[in-house]
Amino acid sequence: MANTRIDFTGFHWLDISNPTPEYLNEVAAEYGLHPTSVQDCLQPEHLPKYEMIDEVSFIVLRAFDRECSSESDTVQELTRKVAIFYGDEFVITIHRTDQPFLDAMVQRWQKRSGKDPAYTPEHILADAINEVVRSYERPILDCVAQLEIFEQEIFGAGTHRKFRMAKGYYLKRKVSVYKRILRSTLEPLTKVMASAEAQLMPHFQNARELIDNLYFYADETSESIGSLLNLHISLQSQKTNEASRRTNEVMRVLTIFSCFFLPINFIASIYGMNFENMPELKNEHGYYMALGLMFSVAVGIFIWFRSKGWLKKGVA
């Protein structure tokens, strides 16, 4: 467990990392925090939300986790929760793991703490919300870049790698998580803006505009991924249909040959019996008569097939 305290004029900021339940209970008793809100700090599944209990505001935010694996595709795997309590005299940020953006904020505000007495807890809150939203810029841009690679893989342009449906599916799941978190973050941001001071509105408005822009990119990427997946399925179906068509064409040719030779084989099999009472066996022209019969049957079948148009390529 680690904590950092920064004192300002009239309030202070306490940043707590990986606290124990016992320590949180002490903090809750000292600052008058509601027990259920404190319990929420240690539960990782919460989406962004805003609550106002007595004179203390409680906000849950979720920032992108830079340490997540490339296979991560759920809210808990891709993001980390940051709980914020703030009132007139304090700001408390609680998180289970170290957050790089919070470490940078601590260093930044340690330098500012004694320079401007006009700073309020809302300044810390506005900075935190902006940094949380900004943490999604890089992963969403990475998804856009990955989408372009998938498009090249599907069409075989500039790459020898083959597109796999699973990769597109997991990318779509990632983008869906980003959309869900960004959309959920709008609710606490809107409630905070409703009571924020006029001088802080530009800071909160920047966060709102950034959410809108990132959500637009994520939504466009999600739709493009869906279109690429459908296109990939169509191309695979087309290849399958083409292979089936070629197989059908081969079978058609073999069937035509079978139709020609089946009656000829039938005639040959009859005369191959060599029974003594077969009159054609002792006829000096019997051999030529049998060949003529076979030829006539073949010509007759050919004329019949041609009149039906069955000899044309591509005819079923």
Image: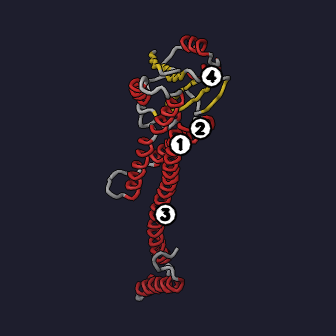
Label 3 Cα crowd, 10 Å radius (few <14 / some 14-19 / many 20+): few
Q: Residue at x 34, y 58 (%)?
A: 157
Q: Residue at x 32, y 53 (%)?
A: 160
Q: Tell me which label, 4 or 2, sits earlier in the chain.
A: 4
Residue type at mark 1: give it: Gln
Q: Is residue 192 above or below residue 230?
A: above
Q: Which mark is residue 292?
A: none
Q: Looking at the rendering, which quadrant does residue 182 occupy?
A: top right
State the residue position of label 4: 37
Please report whichever mark, 3 or 1, sits nearer to the chain's N-terminal start: 1
Q: In this image, 198 relative to 53: left or right?
A: left
Q: Which residue is mark 2?
A: 193
Q: Are marks 2 and 1 in contact (CB under 8 Å)?
A: yes
**Residue 243 in the image, given as x and y percentages of width and height:** 44, 63
* Real-space Cα separation, disc 4 to disc 3, in angstroms: 59 Å
Residue linked to disc 1:
205
Label number found at residue 241? 3
The amino acid at mark 3 is Asn
Image spot of residue 4 (x, y percent): 44, 18
**Position of residue 78 measured from the top left corner of the image (x, y, whole percent):** 48, 34
Q: Is residue 77 visible?
A: no
Distance in Å between CA atoms under marks 3 and 1: 53 Å
Under circle 3, the secondary element is helix
Provide residue 276's location: percent of width, then percent of height.
48, 77
Above or below, comparing residue 270 to residue 199 in the picture? below
Q: Which of these two is toward me, 244 or 102?
A: 102
Q: Nearer the viewer, mark 3 or mark 1?
A: 1
Count up the numbered dots.
4
